[in-house]
Amino acid sequence: MAHRITPRVCAAVCAFAFLFPAALTAADSGSATTSENPENFRLEITGSAWLVNTSGTIQSSGTPINLVTDLAAAQQQPTFFGRFVFKPKQKQRIVIEGFPFSVTGYNTVNRSITYHGQTFNVSQTLQSSADLDYLFAGYQYDVLSGPMGHLGFSVGGAWASANGTLHGVETGITSSRSETVGLPLAGAEFRIFPIPHHRLIDIEGGVRGMAVGSYGHYLEASANGGICVGPVTILAGYRTVNADLHNASSSPSGIDVHLTGPAFSAMWRW
């Protein structure tokens, strides 16, 4: 299915295209050359514009509902992703990150679907909305840390609150479901400065997740690259979240949702 390039997407790409050469020019003046260890900082704050494409299914006491073919969920949704890192010691990190995600849809269904006990019939027009608030907090220890970057492993917990609503345009019937879950998560993260004695180029990535037995699994991953000018780093990359979480009761409910898309970030270190 082809995705329409929205004006907001164009604006984000143009902004990054402007910032990248500007930062590169500043870096050429020598501001990114340093004999100091770039991992010597106390605070790191990252703000990202994540352009999310959504796919998968949701289910609540009824049939699995496809977010794309049944609900026509909007794609390339601009979503804020934030990350805060505090380093009490050289190899230790306290990490807090999260995002508020919302998506809407409007579609005429070609089959009968049931959501939270309410049935919506063939040829009925559905207006849908879904919200997901996600927050992670954890501890990371860097087994490697130095002028060339770091490699660390983390453990922590995530809190996620989801709400989904379907509204029948012709009938006026509305069905909603909310759910809040907590998840233990573990993962690994790295950063590389590939040019010796120079922090101009920054390559980084990470993965975090957990299998929760018969209840499914959660997995997130990201990869980014960019340039560093003083305390500021401009990055572009890709982020993905796969959440397959459900119950195994006689009235099955859950989600099998995939959130993926490019991310454009600015990061500050002190």
Image (tube, helix red, strand yellow):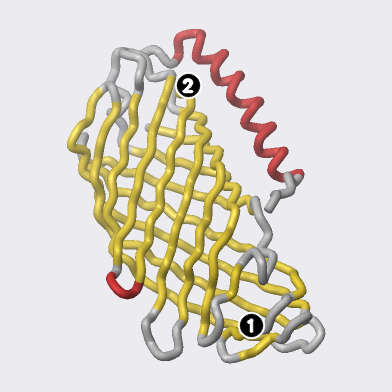
Q: Nearer the viewer, mark 1 or mark 2?
A: 1
Give the quadrant of residue 125. Answer: bottom right
What amino acid type should be assigned to the residue bearing mark 2?
Val
Q: Position of residue 72 (x, y in %)?
A: 69, 65
**Residue highlighted by disc 2:** 229
What distance separates the C-alpha of mark 1 from that of mark 2?
53 Å
Choose the circle earlier in sequence order: 1 or 2: 1
Near mark 2 (Cα within 10 A), the count class, few <14, some 14-19 or many ≥20, is many
Which secondary structure, mark 2?
strand
The residue labelled by disc 1 is: 113
Q: Position of residue 58 (x, y in %)?
A: 53, 73
Q: Which mark is residue 160?
A: none
Q: Is residue 224 left or right of residue 70?
A: left
Q: Residue at x 42, y 67 (%)?
A: 244
Q: Residue at x 22, y 30 (%)?
A: 145
Residue for point 39% across, 12% down:
33
3 sits left or right of 58 in the view: right
Q: Secondary structure at mark 1?
A: strand
